[in-house]
Amino acid sequence: MKKVLAMVLAGGRGERLYPLTRDRAKPAVPFGAIYRIIDFTLSNCLHSGVRRIYVLTQYKSTSLHRHIQFGWNILSAPLGEFIEAVPAQQRIDEHWYQGTADAIFQNIHILQEERPDLVLVLSGDHIYKMDYRKMIAFHLEKGADLTVGVIRMDRKLSREFGVIEADGDWKLVGFQEKPDEPKTIHGDPGGIMASMGIYVFNTEILVRRLIEDTRSDSSHDFGKDIIPMMIGRDRVFAFDFRRGDCGGTGYWRDVGTIDAYYEANTDLISVTPQLNLYDAQWPILTYQPPSPPAKTVWIEERRVGTALNSIISNGCIISGGNVKRSILSPRVTIHSFAEIEDSILLEGVDVGRNAKIKRTIIDKEVEIPPGMEIGYHLDEDAKRFTVTASGIVVVPKGIRL
Amino acid sequence: MKKILVVEDEESLRLLYEEELKAEGYDVLTARNGREAIRQLEAGKPDLIILDIVMPVMDGMEALGRIVSQERRIPVILNTSYSGYRQDFMSWAADAYVAKSHDLTELKKKIRELLEKGKGR
């Protein structure tokens, strides 16, 4: 059995998710009512038997550290298992991580102390369910130095991804970073093989290539620099996500923008979402403070508390208001005659009487005054809130209205 | 004239290196530990660094990490009497290793090689 160490890169700013990332790093952004984005990667590790995990944090990491401390303090240290959040420490260099590869290089002392055979480099930014054991087995079977997780994407999206070119044996022969003219999949001109930003490395090769990269003019990025440097020189293979996808639907999302975030969340309300959160074989773990059960109250002629086609978390009280096609995180209160449609309400939001909310994301601990309307007059909303191109309004955390 | 930075805490050895390398026609700077070496880098760039590992204040491994991140082009020779250093991943960032000795033949040879190689960069 090979000794595997996971390094989860969780330092991303997630600027396009602003204002959800105003007070937290992207991996700490709430998702699916009760989770944080990083819960998916950490749950994957856990279920894959990868239980030695460092989470490398950087910007705005307080919320992420707290979540990991409260929610993920579940492994057994005496068995050699741990999940540890490591802030940027400037041990080597007196600046922030310059790129994904630099983040690992700056923490080379961790590899030194742990001495794993393999290093699983993951991103804390993505939502998917994957059995990393399959990828590790593939890596060993191929005798690879590096294995890159890949997923088929539409050709049109090539500017957002590292595009992999592999031969019939899945060996990498080319890599393009966010190309306009991508190499398409053989026999599938509409598709590209996109890098998922997850890697299995043999530790020694990883260290040698990181050092080489540090000593050259480089952006110190796995995609842009390390993979191209290794192609043709080391044994680099691509691992098809479908072979490790334990959801079976090919679901993988980089919720990089507010619109993508909104869609990925609201997809969960559909009858059979692509992302199944109810699979007992692969549960997603998280931290939830104890809350009482959700409840609805009032059933009178003109005042009925209802929630339809919605996700309602613990601690919610729908008190004579109506909720449709929405996601309510824990401890959300909807007062009488309020109407919530197609919206995402994060923890502790309180919507006053007669308020009307449509196509809006309300971040934590916001109190919506009685009668306020959001999402109905976008010009007005845009004066106070972020409004996306597709018309989603975002109300930032803790704002006083 | 090529400038060499000698980082060595032991004074007698530092003086020996300084004299011998000056005799070879190099300009020699010295530092007593890693921290001094980093400060020297900020003041003026040497063409090559000879770095001891076991030193007070800041040891050679820590200094090496900082040197390769800041001044990635400057070749570094690790100079030590301990062999255990190869266990340290960071030691792989050095361009050469030479065991400590009062006979500097091997060290001088490595210096020439690395400076020669550096011309092509």
Image (cartoon, coloured by chain):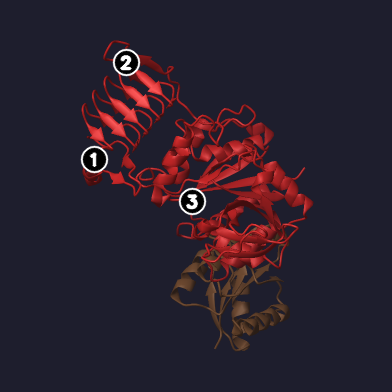
Q: Position of residue A321 (x, y in %)?
A: 31, 21
- Pointers 3 and 1 in contact (CB under 8 A)? no
**Label 1 Cα neighbours within 10 Å, binned few <14 / some 14-19 / many ≥20:** few
Say what amino acid the circle numbered 2 marks. Answer: Val
Asked whether, in this view, residue B72 is left or right of residue A241, the answer is: left
Specify the farthest residue to the top: A300
| Mark number displayed over residue B17 | none
Name which of mark 3 and mark 2 comes first in the sequence.
3
Residue B33 in view (yes/no):
no
Residue closest to the eye, B20 or B108? B108
Name which of mark 2 and mark 1 comes first in the sequence.
2
Kindly report the distance in space between the C-alpha atoms of the residues bearing marks 2 and 1: 26 Å
Above or below — where is A117 with respect to B80?
above
Above or below — where is A276 with respect to A18?
above
Above or below — where is A344 with respect to A304?
below
**Is disc 2 placed on a helix, strand or loop?**
loop
Q: According to the image, label 3 marks what residue?
A: A88
Q: Which chain does the residue under circle 1 lie in?
A: A
Asked whether, in this view, residue B31 is left or right of residue A393, the answer is: right
Q: According to the image, label 1 marks what residue?
A: A377
| Mark number displayed over residue A304 | 2
Name which of mark 3 and mark 1 comes first in the sequence.
3
Q: Are marks 3 and 2 on the same chain?
A: yes
Quadrant of the image occupied by residue B121: bottom right
Give chain A's shade: red
Q: Position of residue A328 (x, y in %)?
A: 40, 28
Q: Position of residue A258 (x, y in %)?
A: 39, 45
